[in-house]
Amino acid sequence: MSIKYPFSELEHDIRSVLAVNQDYSAIVDQIRPFLEKLLQTENLVPASYLKPQADKYAQYLLYKPEDEAFSVIAFVWGAGQKAPVHDHLIWGLVGVYTGELVETRYRRIDNGLAAAQQFILEIAKTIQVVKGDISFVYPPKYDIHGVSNLSDDTAITIHIYGADIGKKPRHIHDPLTGSLRDVVTKHDNAEAIYLS
Ligand SMILES: [Fe+2]
């Protein structure tokens, strides 16, 4: 497959940002144009990965460098599939490749004063995102959201995170009770689709 923006070039671009920035806000701002470019790549996700899974959204690792300084993931969302409210604990960008989704972003309103395993959350905003839109996450302020495909069609999103998100311990939140539980969301493929 020919790819106009090879992952070797994306890696070079991302590393040039990470080399001079620690601030998550600056990192997501500067990596955003790279994701914009990646979203314009035709056939980025091979055809054999495009069919949604029956039970939940699919999470396919596209690429990560050996040191796992970042990862690029494709999510395939069947009609009606959703990700429960969750955090990331690292910077990340989410771009819509095809279709549309609803993202509900939460803010913590207990200022960390609630019991250790309680996060009192309120909805900060709910947005509909469509092909080409890019949103971001990073702790502590912009890290918790839920994502749903409320449409009748499959949606595909491309994510870039500052770690291998398929290995990272993080949390699923219940906004109704304030409780949270530990989770690691493993990739649905054993090996990256594009090798480093
Ligand atoms: Fe997320």
Image: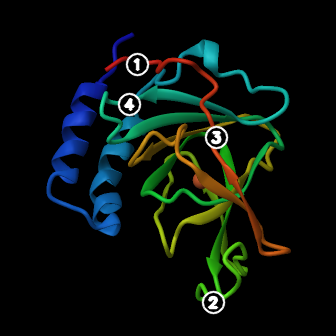
The residue where tag 2 is placed is: 113
The residue where tag 3 is placed is: 185
The residue where tag 1 is placed is: 194
Work out how far the residue at label 2 is from the one at label 4, CA to CA, in angstroms: 37 Å
Q: Is residue 114 above or below residue 1?
A: below
Residue 175 location (% of width, % of height)? 78, 72
Q: What's the residue type where badge 4 is placed?
A: Lys
**Kind of element beneath mark 4:** loop
Q: What's the residue type where badge 1 is placed?
A: Tyr
What label does residue 64 carry, if any?
4
Q: What's the residue type where badge 2 is placed?
A: Leu
Circle count: 4
Q: Does the residue at mark 4 contact the one at mark 1 (Cβ under 8 Å)?
A: no
Q: Earlier in the sequence, mark 1 or mark 3?
A: 3
Q: What's the residue type where badge 3 is placed?
A: Thr
Which quadrant of the view contains residue 35? top left
Which one is closest to the eye, mark 4 or mark 1? 4
Looking at the image, what colour scheme do you see?
rainbow
Work out how far the residue at label 1 is from the one at label 2, CA to CA, in angstroms: 44 Å
**Kind of element beneath mark 2:** loop
> Which residue is painted at 77% across and 26% down in the image?
53
Q: Does the residue at mark 4 contact the one at mark 3 (Cβ under 8 Å)?
A: no
> Which residue is painted at 55% across and 33% down in the image?
74
**Kind of element beneath mark 1:** loop
Q: Is residue 81 above or below residue 111?
A: above
